[in-house]
Amino acid sequence: MNYAQQHLRETGAVLEMLDAAAIEKIAELLAQIKAGAGRIFFLGVGGSAGNCSHAVNDFRKLAGIECYAPTDNVSELTARINDDGWENTFVEWLKVSRLSHWDAVFIFSVGGGDADRNISVNLVAAVKYAKTVGAKVIGIVGRDGGYTARVADAFVIIPTVNPETVTPHSEAFQAVIWHLLVSHPRLKPNEARWESLGK
């Protein structure tokens, strides 16, 4: 078996193991956020930050939900890293955005943050802050031992089928799941352009 075959076989195995009920729970929670005119703040680092930008587009345009990602503004992001420190980068951004109990913080992360091991501590701090103001915490993560999975109101863990490919599968399936969500009947008021042309 060559590497492409192996990777695709692993991808199929991950797909078969995904928890559909957990995804439906996220859809239900997001429907509540939308009904209450709440906002979604997507937080991630590395490749997950790029996924946050794409998700913001889809949830705003297709699901009609007000959304933001602090990593989209590199000037503010780097100023906050410089002045507030990496750990507080997202927390201070959320404070200025007046995060409230009407809103949700949506984490895209491979590990979900681990303060004890100094991994994605800015995500941990942001989740803790969200809890203090009563905002909902949602996550799509690739590990079950991270902080997000321990405290989130709704989350999906991307199953590990090969410990050598946790990151690529986690980040790829973040996209699979958020595209499922913006296509979900509970959330989608608008058709995507190509789907509308077929009618």
Image: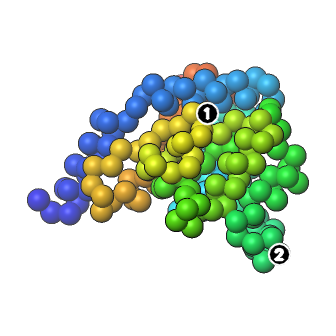
Amino acid type, label 2: Asp
Residue that lies at the very extreme toward the left in this rendered image: 1
**Residue 148 visible at all:** yes
Q: Is residue 55 above or below residue 90?
A: above
Amino acid type, label 1: Asp
Could you classify mark 2 by the number of other residues whose Cα lies within 10 Å: few (under 14), some (14-19), or many (20 or more)? few
CB under 8 Å between callouts 1 and 2?
no
Q: Is residue 21 above or below residue 76?
A: above
- Locate residue 40 relative to residue 44 in the image: left or right: right
Q: Quadrant of residue 25?
A: top right
- Locate residue 133 relative to residue 110 in the image: left or right: right
- Locate residue 164 relative to residue 74 in the image: left or right: left
Q: Quadrant of the C terminus?
A: top right
Q: Which residue is mark 2?
A: 83
Residues 36 and 146: in front is 146
Residue at coordinates 80% horizontally, 70% vertically from top-left?
84
At numbered mark 1, what does the secondary structure look like: helix, strand or loop? loop
Q: Looking at the image, is mark 1 or mark 2 earlier in the sequence?
A: 2
Residues 86 and 72: in front is 86
Estimate the x, y position of residue 32 in percent, counting from the top left.
70, 24
Residue at coordinates 57% horizontally, 46% vertically from top-left?
148
Q: Which residue is mark 1?
A: 153
Residue at coordinates 49% horizontally, 55% vertically from top-left?
111
Q: Is residue 122 above or below residue 135?
A: below
Could you classify mark 1 by the number of other residues whose Cα lies within 10 Å: few (under 14), some (14-19), or many (20 or more)? some
Estimate the x, y position of residue 35 in percent, counting from the top left.
76, 23
- Locate residue 34 relative to residue 198 in the image: left or right: right
